[in-house]
Image (cartoon, rainbow, N blue to C red):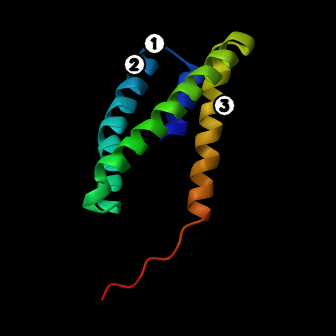
Amino acid sequence: MFAIVYFMFALAPSRRAIWLTMAFYGLFYALTNPVLKALVVETVGSEVRGRALGIYFFVTSITTLLASVITGALWKVYGAAVPFYFSAAIAAVSAIALLAHRTPRAAAD
């Protein structure tokens, strides 16, 4: 989904398309972001939940900062569309890698 949204941002066929894509992205983000936090909470023991969430937010903040710096540099040097194409490509490659690396689920008892 992320790859499709950013590809649409790069194409920017019309204002309406951008607004609809942004609304779709907002809905996608609202539905998936809490799941990541819940995954962190459910993965660690109760005695280290605060630390785990702190590490999660620290890492996501640092990566967001780095992504913003890279995006700004790409935008400045190559124009507005390139950062979106780059993000879409990274997201697509990541999705393919995750699908290729799927591990079989354990059988339900």
- Alpha-carbon span between mark 2 and mark 1: 6 Å
Vertically, is 96 above or below 59?
below
Check residue 86 in the rendering and tell me which mark sits there, or answer none: 3
16 on left or right of 67:
left
Residue in view at x 60 percent, y 49 percent:
94
Place residue 78 in its image quadrant.
Answer: top right
Q: Residues within 10 Å of mark 2 (few under 14, many from 20)?
A: few
Residue in view at x 37 percent, y 31 percent:
24
Q: Residues within 10 Å of mark 1 (few under 14, many from 20)?
A: few
Residue in view at x 65 percent, y 23 percent:
70
Instruction: Tell me the SS state at disc 1.
Output: helix
Check residue 15 in the rendering and tell me which mark sits there, or answer none: 1
Most distant residue in the right direction = 77
42 on left or right of 106:
left
Kind of residue sitting beneath label 2: Trp
What residue would you read off at disc 2?
19
Instruction: Tell me the SS state at disc 3.
Output: helix
Kind of residue sitting beneath label 3: Phe
Q: Nearer the viewer, residue 51 or 95?
A: 51
Q: Nearer the viewer, residue 70 or 28?
A: 70
- Alpha-carbon span between mark 3 and mark 2: 21 Å
Vertically, is 22 above or below 99?
above
Instruction: Tell me the SS state at disc 2.
Output: helix
Check residue 48 in the rendering and tell me which mark sits there, or answer none: none
- Alpha-carbon span between mark 1 and mark 3: 21 Å
**Cβ atoms at labels 1 and 3 below 8 Å apart:** no
